[in-house]
Structures are given as C-alpha cells and as structure tokens.
Image: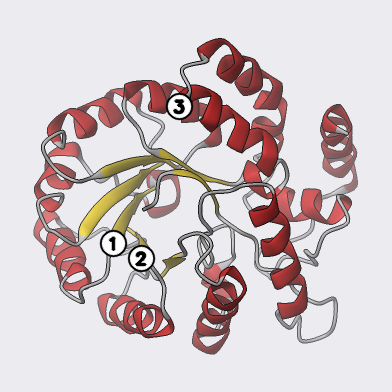
Amino acid sequence: MFEGVLPAIITPFRRNSAMDVDLEGLRSNIEFLIGQGVHGIVPCGSTGESATLSFEEHDRVISETIDVVNGRVPVLAGTGSNNTAEAVALTKNAKELGADGVLVISPYYNKPNRSGLVKHYTILADLDIPVVMYNVPGRTGQNLLPDMVIELASHPNIVGIKEASGDIGQVSRIIEGTLDEDFLVISGDDAITLPMLAMGGAGVISVAANVEPGRMVSLFEYFCDGDLEMALDIHYELSPLFRAMFIDTNPIPVKKAVELRGMAAGPVRLPLDELDAQKTHALKEVLDLYD
C-alpha cells in the first residue's frame, strides 16, 4: 500500500498573527501532487511541522487530506509522539478519520530502553491500523536497531519502517531480516532512495517531492521498469535539490521552495525561523536548474 513516492507534505500557514493553517492551500497543494502521479500522501510528519500543531489542527489537517485525496492514493498520517498516551490518542483519531495507516516516529527526548520501544510500537499496532515505524536518529537521539525492527516486523499491523538513519548497512540488514515478512523498508532520505531501491526498498517518503514530484515519480518508475540508466540520470539531476532541502533545518528550505514555486506555504512556526537571504538566494539558484 505504501510503495512508491509519498511526499511528506508541508503544512501551509497563513501569514496572519495566529498563523492559522491554510486549509485551502493544503488542498491545492495535494491536488498538484496527485496530478503529478505521486503514490501516496503523508500529512503531519516532521516536514508538516507536527511538533507545533495543536491536537485539533493535527486532526483537521489529516481530515482535510483524506477528504481531498478521496481514495485516489493512500494517506499515511503522522501520529508519533514521545508520550505513548498521546501517540495512542492521535493514532485512534487518524484511524477514525479514515487514514490508511500511520507513520510513528520513535519517541524523542525520552531515550526509551529497548523494552519500552517494543511496548510503545506494539500498543500502537494493537489499535488495528497499519503502522510504519520512523527511524530518524538525528531528530530523536536514538537509533532503532535492526534486531528490534526485525522483531517488531512480525506484528501483523507493523507493515514497514521509514529509514532515515543514513546507514546503508543497517538498511540492508533490516531488509535481509524481513524477507519472509510482509514488511516495507522505505527511504526517509531522498538522496539514498535509489540505492535503497536497489537493495529491495519499497520507495521514499520524500521532502523533495513537494517541489519536484514528477521527477521523483519518474526516478521510481524508471527503476521499476528496469531502466537503471534513466533512474540514475534523474538521481543525479535531482541531487542538487536533495542537498538544498537541507541547507537549513527541515522544513525551512522546502517551505521556502514551495512558496517560490507559487504554491501555498507561508511561514514556519517558531522555534523554527525563516530562511535567511543568503540561503534563499542559493535555493533560488537550485530551483532555476529545474525551471
């Protein structure tokens, strides 16, 4: 269900004093992405600034996403938290709203022990909705090690992992250890999508696809068709964009890029701040490569 290119969508905000969620802009952005052939939509992840959304806003963004998608592609809703009870509440709400699955970041700040992590994910999976784990040590301060991921993959509702450790050897070990399971290993880093696909990865939950969805879809589809030369050409064509998306903390650059493309974006919420003038100029130069 969650194979291919799934943009981790931004949450557009209005440039008013309250920085309200721009629901009309959200719908317009999603229509654009679906029109470009993406294979799924991921609202309320790190790129969607979930950490600064209220519970009400979180549910509203998921609800609006499901409504505009209208079954055309799967919706994988971010429902993670460093508080298991909060993650349970968010996951239950996403299930009731009709999400096809949930993306759950490993608990940040707490640095739970192994048994705590296993219980955290098991409790969420027991809510009877497909769960994709999310490993991003750079944000959580803790790595989901392959042996634990392989153990959790045996749960029928834990269907995959978004892997953003940057460790290709770790990715390989997870894929090797879950070959007998119905389990997806999805890239969480645009720059290593192609090598992960070559090892048996299922696709990418992508930041860059907010900006260049058509090219990201082409990369995936060329690979699936066995045209590795074209897939590699697109990988290198997109590499400057992959780097540009991280010239500052995500999603600061991608929101600015989306805004520069004339789509709904608005500001980032504090404690993140706007992209400075020098980096904005550098970002414009990269975007010019694709225009």
Give residue 157's position: percent from left, percent from top. 19, 62
SS under mark 3: helix
Looking at the image, is 197 positioned above or below residue 12? above
Mark 2 or mark 3, which is nearer the start of the sequence?
A: 2
Residue that badge 1 annotates: 131
Q: Residues within 10 Å of mark 2 (few under 14, many from 20)?
A: many
Q: What amino acid is found at the position of numbered circle 1 in the picture?
A: Val
Residue under the image location 44 percent in, 45 percent down: 138
Q: Which quadrant of the view contains residue 173? A: top left
| Residue 224 image label | 3
Instruction: Report whether 204 appears left or right of 202.
Output: right
Instruction: Report whether 194 appears left or right of 176.
Output: right
Residue under the image location 27 percent in, 64 percent down: 130
Give residue 98's position: percent from left, percent from top. 41, 78
The answer to the question of whether label 3 and label 2 lie on touching residues, with beta carbons closer than 8 A, is no
Residue under the image location 18 percent in, 60 percent down: 117
Q: What amino acid is found at the position of numbered circle 3 in the picture?
A: Cys
Residue that badge 2 annotates: 101
Q: What amino acid is found at the position of numbered circle 2 in the picture?
A: Gly
Res 109 visible: yes
